Amino acid sequence: MGGPRITLALERFARRVTEWAGGSWAFGVAVGVIVVWALTGPMFAFSDTWQLVINTGTTIVTFLMVFLIQRSQNKDAQALHLKLNEIVAALEGASNRLINIEELTEDEVRVLHQHYRTLVSIAKAETSLTHSHSIEEATARHRRKKRAARAPGTSAPVDSAQPPAPSVDRLTGGPARPDVE
């Protein structure tokens, strides 16, 4: 669909129109058009044609602006996702499973949402507000705490520094891969 030159020219034009349409001058021009249209009403006896002019003009502008707004939102959303992906990839301890999460199906997003609800409920049981961990780590720590609390006469610390037990990747159902955490 068009060569690279046409695509680039359309992209530049759309970007310039989007920038202009979001500025004060565009608002001023729109107000000016409405004022001129209203002032010319008595000259045209407020006829159907006079009304049709503003209706047609606003319909055309609205039609074109829908595409410009969608283009701008798509580009902004993509840039935001790329920035968030970079942060997730760079942060130690962040789950790399969240990179490109926007490409998951709605069912997969619901599954992840449920896992984070589980993490929230586990975190609410924590006494420290600043403690952070993965779902697997939180689940393993929670189990250790429960075992320590149930074991009679044990003096083991409630939150030992033992690594969490091997876990299951809740998204795929297979074993969790430590290289993607």
Image (spheres, rainbow, N blue to C red):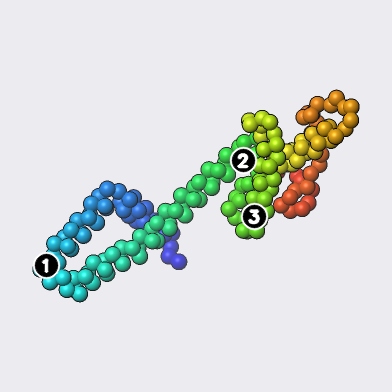
Label 2 belongs to which residue? Answer: 89
Quarter of image, res 57: bottom left
SS label for mark 2:
helix
Q: Which mark is residue 110?
A: 3
Q: Position of residue 113 (x, y in %)?
A: 64, 50
Q: Amino acid at mark 1?
A: Pro
Q: Position of residue 35 (x, y in %)?
A: 18, 58
Residue at 28%, 64% (x, y): give it: 58
Mark closest to the chain's N terminus, 3 or 2: 2
Q: Quadrant of the C terminus?
A: top right
Q: Amino acid at mark 2?
A: Ala
Label 1 belongs to which residue? Answer: 42
SS label for mark 3:
helix
Q: State which mark lies toward you, 3 or 2.
A: 3
Q: Amino acid at mark 3?
A: Arg
Quarter of image, res 69: bottom left
Crowding around mark 3 (Cα neighbors within 10 Å: few <14, some 14 to 19, many 20+) is: few
* Cα–Cα span, label 2 and label 1: 64 Å
